[in-house]
Image (cartoon, rainbow, N blue to C red):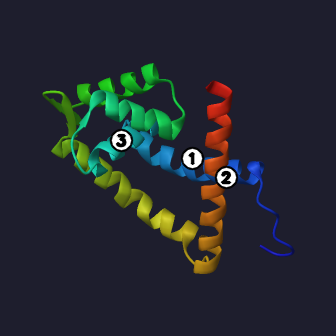
Amino acid sequence: MTGTAPLADARALGLAHYAARGVLEHVLARHGLTFQQQVALRAAVTAEAPQTRDGLVAQVGAALKSDPAEVRATVDALLARRLLLADGVHLGPTDAGRALLAAVGAETAPVTARVWGGIPVEDLAAAGRVLALVTERADAELAALTG
């Protein structure tokens, strides 16, 4: 980039999000996985303890600001594909679910390295602080609108 860097704003954030998401969705499509399914599967794989269906639905719904019924359908699709497994009231990832998430990670890693590589640590730290603040404020605004 040359010249003066643009100030961060909602449009710049959205464009960056959709550019990165487009790359991820391209890889996910090759595996027959949707973005929301990947988020739910990642939440199950990275959970410190097995989650209930309601807990997983709440976590994914809060992260994506999605309707609980839509997230339940996503979880059901992961169960049907045997990427998640119900063990009593808890859900956990299967070996196939873990392997699929690892394969997606391996495919996206080189792209991620090219996209994020070379950005100075202090710039990443500043961007991280700003994005955390924007997220906090937007979550508060959404809560006020829906509460």
| SS type, badge 2 | helix
In space, the residues marked 2 and 3 are separated at their CA atoms by: 32 Å
In space, the residues marked 1 and 2 are separated at their CA atoms by: 22 Å
Corner quadrant of residue 69: top left
Q: Residues within 10 Å of mark 3 (few under 14, many from 20)?
A: few
- Name the side, left or right, on which 147 lies relative to 47: right
Q: Quadrant of the C terminus?
A: top right
Q: Position of residue 41 (x, y in %)?
A: 33, 41
In space, the residues marked 1 and 3 are separated at their CA atoms by: 15 Å
Most extreme residue toward the right is 3
Q: Which residue is mark 3?
A: 31
Q: Which residue is mark 1?
A: 22
Q: Position of residue 140 (x, y in %)?
A: 64, 40
Q: In the rendered view, tell whether residue 18 sits above or below residue 111.
A: above
Corner quadrant of residue 43: top left
Q: In the rendered view, tell whether residue 130 sits above or below residue 140.
A: below
- Please name the amino acid that badge 3 sits on: His
Residue shown at the point (30%, 51%) measured from the top left: 46
Residue shown at the point (25%, 51%) measured from the top left: 48
Q: Residues within 10 Å of mark 1 (few under 14, many from 20)?
A: few
Corner quadrant of residue 95: top left
Residue shown at the point (22%, 46%) measured from the top left: 49
Q: Which residue is mark 2?
A: 134
